[in-house]
Image (cartoon, grey):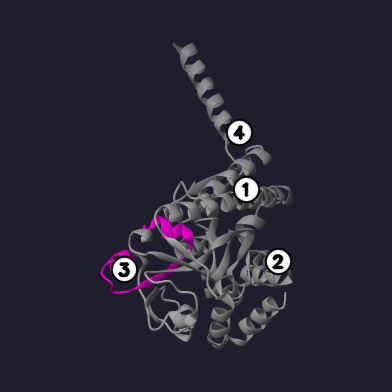
């Protein structure tokens, strides 16, 4: 009897030691708003795979999609409190770092190539530095977002074609002022109300990236997709500065290297997804309309610049000159 008790104790201790040995030294809780099919989530999974492999299990990454850790702002606050570690976030960062407003300023970027050049330039570095300094968040990687386009039930080729059209916009002063300057009647509204409002003709148009136009089925209530490209933007994958710095340097490097792989992986998925979305929306019956983007930009820019503070305006001008 004593022998079996002793044997059981030894086995129990051995199992406990084994579990301790297998436990990670660090756990990164990575919360974001996208669902499991979204390319952001697929990129996060690639990051997890790279980190855990490269660190030989010393770092574990736990991913929480679908706002399981709360909204974007909730997760940022949790990271700052130390109850979460990573998230995917964009222009919301301007609540701490005003320069982050450039991440979604209307007509800041001429095309995708210009956006890439800016993000990788000293301007991008300046934005990242302010995010780290003021929000205690370290940008690890950046993802391009699909440009915001205007949908409507009449073709819009020139700002004059807006002619008082009732247009849903997010409750963002910069967006409201921009569309007002362009001649529309911008109406701030929750995204959840947009489909029904279009259906009932409470509003006549809305603006969003292709991904949201498709997922919200706006093709059922809108005929035209006008290629205004009025907002080109990017988002960051960020980690808490304290969480990163508590790791030894070799593991910090693992995180940075894995983030570089994640960024390249997401970029490839993004290009494929944009092609898929355009094809799908055409198949659903939407007509794509080429617009006079120069005329839109010329009419919108005074309104955009008037909303920006001095620091933001200087950065906006620097972007235009790159």
Question: Could you tell which of marks 4 and 2 lies nearer the N-terminus?
Answer: 4
Q: Secondary structure at mark 4?
A: helix
Instruction: Give the x, y percent position of residue 37.
Output: 46, 46
Q: Which residue is denoted by mark 2 in the rendering?
A: 117
104 is within the stretch colored magenta = no
Question: Could you tell which of marks 2 and 3 lies nearer the N-terminus?
Answer: 2
How far, Cα to Cα, is label 2 from label 1?
A: 19 Å
Which image quarter: residue 21? top right
Above or below residue 8? Residue 213 is below
Question: Could you tell which of marks 3 and 1 lies nearer the N-terminus?
Answer: 3
How far, Cα to Cα, is label 4 from label 2?
A: 45 Å
- Counting every numbered tag in the picture gives 4
How far, Cα to Cα, is label 3 from label 1?
A: 36 Å
Residue contact between numbered discs 2 and 1, judged by CB atoms under 8 Å: no
Residue contact between numbered discs 3 and 1, judged by CB atoms under 8 Å: no
Question: Could you tell which of marks 4 and 3 lies nearer the N-terminus?
Answer: 4
Mark 2 Cα-neighbour bin, 10 Å: few <14, some 14–19, many ≥20: some
Residue contact between numbered discs 2 and 3, judged by CB atoms under 8 Å: no
Question: Could you tell which of marks 1 and 4 lies nearer the N-terminus?
Answer: 4
Mark 3 Cα-neighbour bin, 10 Å: few <14, some 14–19, many ≥20: many
Q: Is residue 273 visible?
A: yes
Q: Which residue is denoted by mark 4 in the rendering?
A: 21
Which segment is the magenta one?
A: 193-217
Above or below residue 257? Residue 80 is below
Label disc, if present, on residue 198 of the rendered structure: 3
Label disc, if present, on residue 265 of the rendered structure: 1
Q: Is residue 163 left or right of residue 258?
A: left
Quadrant showing the C terminus: bottom right
């Amino acid at each position: 009897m004593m022998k079996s008790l002793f044997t059981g104790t030894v086995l129990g201790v051995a199992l406990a030691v084994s579990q301790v040995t297998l436990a990670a030294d660090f756990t990164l809780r990575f919360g974001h708003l996208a669902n499991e099919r979204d390319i952001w989530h697929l990129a996060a999974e690639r990051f997890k795979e790279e980190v855990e492999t490269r660190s030989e299990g010393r770092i574990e990454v736990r991913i929480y999609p679908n706002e399981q850790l709360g909204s974007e702002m909730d997760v940022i606050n949790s990271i700052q409190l130390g109850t979460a570690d990573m998230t995917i976030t964009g222009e919301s960062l301007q609540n701490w770092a005003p320069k982050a407003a450039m991440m979604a300023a209307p007509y800041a970027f001429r095309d995708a190539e210009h956006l890439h050049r800016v993000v990788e330039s000293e301007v991008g570095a300046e934005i990242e530095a302010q995010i780290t300094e003021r929000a205690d968040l370290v940008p690890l990687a950046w993802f391009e977002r699909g440009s915001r386009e205007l949908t409507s039930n009449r073709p819009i080729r020139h700002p004059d074609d807006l002619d008082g059209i009732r247009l849903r916009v997010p409750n963002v002063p910069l967006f409201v002022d921009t569309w007002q300057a362009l001649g529309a009647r911008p109406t701030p509204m929750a995204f959840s109300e947009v489909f029904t409002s279009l259906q009932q003709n409470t509003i006549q148009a809305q603006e969003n990236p292709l991904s949201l136009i498709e997922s919200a089925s706006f093709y059922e209530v809108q005929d035209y997709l006008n290629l205004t490209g009025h907002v080109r933007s990017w988002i960051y994958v960020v980690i808490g500065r304290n969480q990163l710095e508590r790791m030894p340097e070799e593991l910090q490097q693992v995180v940075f290297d894995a983030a570089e792989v994640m960024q390249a992986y997401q970029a490839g998925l993004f290009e494929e997804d944009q092609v898929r979305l355009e094809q799908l929306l055409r198949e659903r019956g939407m007509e794509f309309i080429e617009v006079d983007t120069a005329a839109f930009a010329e009419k919108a820019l005074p309104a955009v610049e008037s909303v920006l503070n001095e620091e933001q305006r200087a950065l906006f001008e620097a972007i235009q000159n790159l």
